[in-house]
Image (spheres, rainbow, N blue to C red):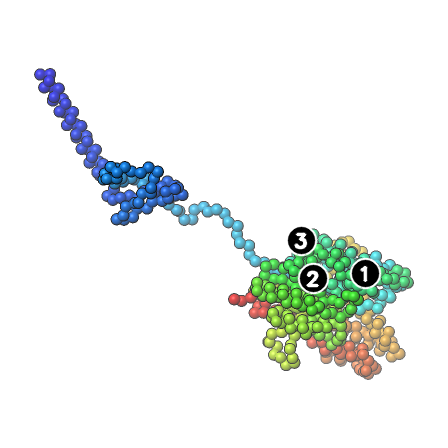
Amino acid sequence: MKRKTWMISALMYAMVFMACFGVLHVLKTLMEPSGPVSVESRESGGPEGTREAKTGEEWEEPAGPALATDSQAQEPQDEVIRQEGYKEWKKKFPGMWTPPQAPEEPYIPPRLILATDLHYQSALAGDGGEAFRLFVERSDGKVVQYLPELLEAFLDEVIEERPSALVLSGDITMNGERLNHEELAARLKRVQDAGIQVLVIPGNHDINNHDASVYYGARKEPAPYIDGPEFHDIYHEYGYDQALSRDDSSLSYVYALDDRNWLLMLDSCQYEPDNKVEGRLKDSTMAWADEQLARAKEEGVFVIPIAHHNLLAQSRMYTTQCAMDNNKEVISLLQKYELPLFFSGHLHVQRIRKHKSEPGVPEGNYGIQEIVTDALSIPPCQYGEVLWEEDGSISYATRAVDVSAWAQKNGSTNPDLLDFEDWSYRYIQKLISDQIRGVVKNLGADVEHSMAATYAGVYIDYYAGREIDVKGIKSTKGYRFWERNMPDSYLIRELDAMIADSDRDNNYFLLPEEEGWITGD
């Protein structure tokens, strides 16, 4: 009986076990995927790389360190199917956080302040005595006694305006005196310290000038002057140290305003072995300049050349010693690269003129434009501002130094400085009138005064680059006195030359977009 009970119990356990096994088999079948599944390695950079499932193909297992036995190779291998697991972490969500990137800086075109013919003279170079007064009376209108104050007012304006660079294009001292050079360089330091690059080149007055003098009492005495290497030593931090390229045979250099714009600073002076008024570019300097312009053209860089001496014959009054002796060769070089602008000084007259290869050439034809900025040292004591406009055009305009505002700001009590515009006009009018009256004599005080006043008025407007009313001037009593009393005088020829040159205003210029600094494809 006990045996029968045990057999029934065993049978029942067997049936329960088989039922459980069947349930598990059904559940396994229901949960299995219908096809092969790709298997990825955990590290894509591992030695086995990433495996990819290919439809209708089997993976080719890489050789491992242990080889299968023959029996193992012959046995059929069951296909192993593995679940891939959770993959949602691999999804990318657009618009979510990305690492911060520095914003691209918008391009800011450069801006220049350009001054020339400062003819700086230290207050220590004269004592205001007889010799100094005579020197002033024989000048062409420089405000000699206030040159230090004028310079300080000018530098204050430069620092306030914050241009890309301040360019001083020669004749930066009175007559090349070492004293004046060293003091000027020291005064320029504060502009450089304000983060504004100062760029200098010499003028014909600055190097090996045997007229270098100081004025004490009744005596004009020779003063130490400097040579070319000494000019570099004094001013090396004002352009030469920062030069992209330097000419080995002169004080010329290239300065990069930015990646798109260069200044070709040309030393046009002749001072070896002796100083000359006339300007000329050496053959070696021309070859160097040609190399720099070719490089700029290759790199798509816009270039503005600057020199002290003039490129073109700009004046009917001053017909010699102004344009460079080899200006035709220089024009040819610059126009070879289709440069649109050239800046200079030297003339002391504000002028703008376009080169024409021959008379009658249409105004719209290409020709390099020269802008001559008048002397900062002569009323109206103005300088030029050059703006690269965003549309590709370039503008130039003059601005007079506001000495009166500077004097008031600095607490000056000097009435000449506090009303500098009026004082400087009266100063130069009297100076030129007195010089003319030294030549025009024995005509009576009223006639002489009228003639001198007419000449002085034209002279002031001519130097300032203003348009002169031809009919209005020629109808004045003073001009008619010139025609009646001195028709063959060189002075009336000068008067007529200044009037003829002043048929338009020369204080503003706009280089249009199509000729400007943005080059097309």
Residue 248: numbered disc: 2
For image coordinates 40% across by 47% down, the residue present is: 93
Determine the image quadrant of residue 13.
top left
Image side of residue 273 versus residue 20, left or right = right
Circle 1 is placed at which residue position? 225
Q: Position of residue 118 (x, y in %)?
A: 75, 63
Residue under the point 77% across and 65% down: 272
Q: Are marks 2 and 3 in contact (CB under 8 Å)?
A: no
Q: CA distance from mark 2 to mark 3?
A: 28 Å
Front position among marks 2 and 3: 2
Instruction: Assess disc 1: are there few (<14), some (14-19) or many (≥20) residues with their C-alpha within 10 Å of its C-alpha.
Output: many
Label 3 Cα crowd, 10 Å radius (few <14 / some 14-19 / many 20+): few
**Closer to us: mark 2 or mark 1?**
2
Residue on which disc 3 sits: 195
Answer with left or right where residue 25 lies relative to residue 335: left
Which residue is at a point 31% across and 38% down the rendered structure image?
67
Q: Give the class, few, some or many, for how many residues have Cα within 10 Å of label 2's Cα (few <14, many ≥20).
A: few
Q: Nearer the viewer, residue 471 or 357?
A: 357
Residue type for callout 3 = Gly
